[in-house]
Image: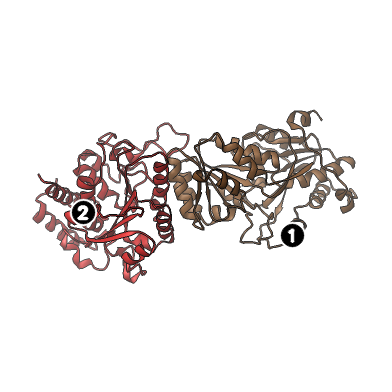
Chain colours: A red, B brown
Amino acid sequence: MSWPQEAKRVADGIRRRVTAFTLKNGGGYLSQACSSAEILATLYTRVMNLGPSVAPPVPPPFGGVPGKNPDYTTGAGYNGPHEPERDRFFISPVHYALVLYATLVETGRMAEEGLEMFNQDGGTVEMIGAEHSPGHELMAGSLGQALSQVIGVALGRRRKGETGRNFVFMSDGEFMIGQTWEAMETLSFYRLDSVIAYVDANGQSADGKIDEVMGIEPLKERLEAFGAVAVEVDGHDARALAAAAETPHEGRPLVVIARTNPYCGVEVLAERAPKFHYIRFAGPEEKEALERFYVRKWGGRE
Amino acid sequence: MTLETQVHQKNLVKWAADKPEVVVFSADLTSSTEVRLFAETYPDRFYSFGMTEQNMMSAAGGMAREGFTPWVHTFAVFLYRRALDQVQMSVAYPNLRVRIVGFLPGITTPGGATHQAIEDVAIMRAVPNMTVLETGDAADVESVLDVAQAVDGPVYIRMLRGQIPRLFTTPMRLGRARRLRRGSDVTLFTAGITTEEAMRATQVLEQRGVSIEHLHVTTHKPFTDPAVLEAASRPKYGVITFENHTTVGGLGSEVAEVMAEHGVGKRLVRLGIPDTYAHGGSRPYLMRHYGLDALALVRAVEKLLGEDLNIGEDDLAAVRVEPVHGDFKAEAL
């Protein structure tokens, strides 16, 4: 299978799995899967240089928080070992956790049983990912903090002479936040070209359309004014997403603005516009409509 | 007692010489937090973050994850107030080795309410995984570096700058108060700049026949020193806490918690900034205005004893504070 075909397969699997969970749980962050499936699929199958997972295929139960706790585990190992020449991956909007878990399953980094543990009490496969959740390395749920944390990681890796890049997956809503812009000016100031951010620009935040919540556009020009190299691509085009990572950006952070559609691949959601942040079923008809869509597209549910 | 200047400035450079893992972060207050000499001596280990305290705090967490120890310097208010969410989620939750060095505790600045860290101990003490330290003299300012560096987790330090007294000749120890005086009528707990102020009052009080047990607290959290309970259990009249902080959540609350948990049935008087914001002014003025000077302590002792000791400002002004030569000698007094 060629890599674009593989990316397509992974993206389709992400949508299928997240849709199934949304049906099973009576709601979920489904539109995030629709918008970001190709971004995560392309990063994991083509762009990032990650080693194989060093974490248990089935995630361990919650072992407590960091501190004086020998049982503490981090979810970072699903993205491979920390090695000087390897890339690292950091997810910022961790309400995309299910999308990331599905990505890990589709790319063979986590067992399917792990996904069954989603949102179960006492587990680590939480709805809003914490750093013990599979594929997660940072505490990022208070949005806007991950990029700054990655600055510290990147500066530290530079001190150690490491050559691996640091990929950050972000949401466009985070560009409402002052800290994001503090981070952007700092990335430029320290010429941190090892940091590459992929932004799922789906135009959506919790309240609805971002345009009606706060002004963040023109995002590309704003980023450039802060010293970044910014490129805009079709966020559902794996080739374009992969090519964007090769954009020359010596001495500057690179931001890939992936323009996406919050119901791509699950078109039955379209009529919910402009509210996509968390899909809830208003009544049985809505749920049945998604059920029918699922069966039509993917066949019977497992 | 001698007064010294720029103690942290000089000491940090010396101390960090053989510690390549130590890096310093600054938020556009490099001279004001006495790290200018560090920046000049080790430019490669100095990181300017400008006025981006939230970003700086998260970045400190990131760098600590890579094995370095960021010593984050700025005014305390911009750390525990402005960047509290970042302190909590980027640093404290992951239990990272970040040293948060907060300057201008309480009323040590004429900068007014925006600059005065009056509730930092209360807030940082409530943060899980956080160790909270406070300095009261030059010896504390120097030795707090080793104490903090040995902690496997985040540390918040209430730091002093500029001209500071040298009161002690021994280094600070984690979780161990310094005992300055043995006595049986009143037990007094002080921290930071109130210690020197209290030393003026205690001398005069002793001369008037009041026997005082005095402990200088440098570790607010963990607050587990057995000497605290022992000292709080003993006095004939009661316990006084005296802090450059609001009376809510700081030293007074720490002592109250220990006393209550152990059923110590003594009176407790909490002296400090009385649950109010302060304003800009000189240190002597602010200490008088908010009841943080030696006279305020004397009045509290008088109230506890129920007697007028006939001590005035002139008696206190005449006191010469001598350095305390370590716990051993102090205990032998």
> In this figure, which residue is indicated by the disc labeled 2?
A243
Residue placed most toward the observer, A107 or B331:
A107
- Co-location on one chain, circles 2 and 1: no
Q: Out of A37 and B234, give the one closest to the viewer.
A: A37
Q: Nearer the viewer, mark 2 or mark 1?
A: 2
For the residue labelled by badge 1, is the local secondary structure a helix, a strand or a loop?
Answer: loop
x%, y% of residue B250? 64, 48
The numbered mark 1 sits on a residue in which chain?
B
Real-space CA distance between mark 2 and mark 1, rounded to the nearest whole angstrom: 62 Å
Residue B316 lies left or right of residue B229; in this view the side is: right
Above or below for A244 versus B39: below
Q: Where residue A92 sits: x, y (%)?
A: 35, 52
Compare residues B113 and A88 and report the one nearer the observer.
Answer: A88
Badge 1: residue crowd in 10 Å (few <14, some 14–19, many ≥20): few
Q: Which residue is mark 1?
A: B282
**Residue B98's spot in the image, x, y percent?**
51, 43
Q: Amino acid at mark 2?
A: Ala
Q: Position of residue B254 (x, y in %)?
A: 64, 43
Look at the image and tell me whether residue B203 can be seen: yes
Asked whether the beta carbons under mark 2 and mark 1 sit within 8 Å of each other, the answer is no
Residue A259 seen in render: no
Label 2 chain ID: A
Image quadrant where one finds the N terminus of chain A: top left
Q: Quadrant of residue B288?
A: bottom right
In-front residue for pair B261/A235: A235
Q: Is residue B194 left or right of residue B103?
A: right
Residue B254 lies, with reference to residue B234, above or below; the image says: below
Q: Residue at x 35, y 54 (%)?
A: A253
Q: Secondary structure at mark 2?
A: helix
How many C-alpha atoms fall within 10 Å of the one at disc 2: few (<14), some, or many (≥20)?
few
Q: Amino acid at mark 1?
A: Ser
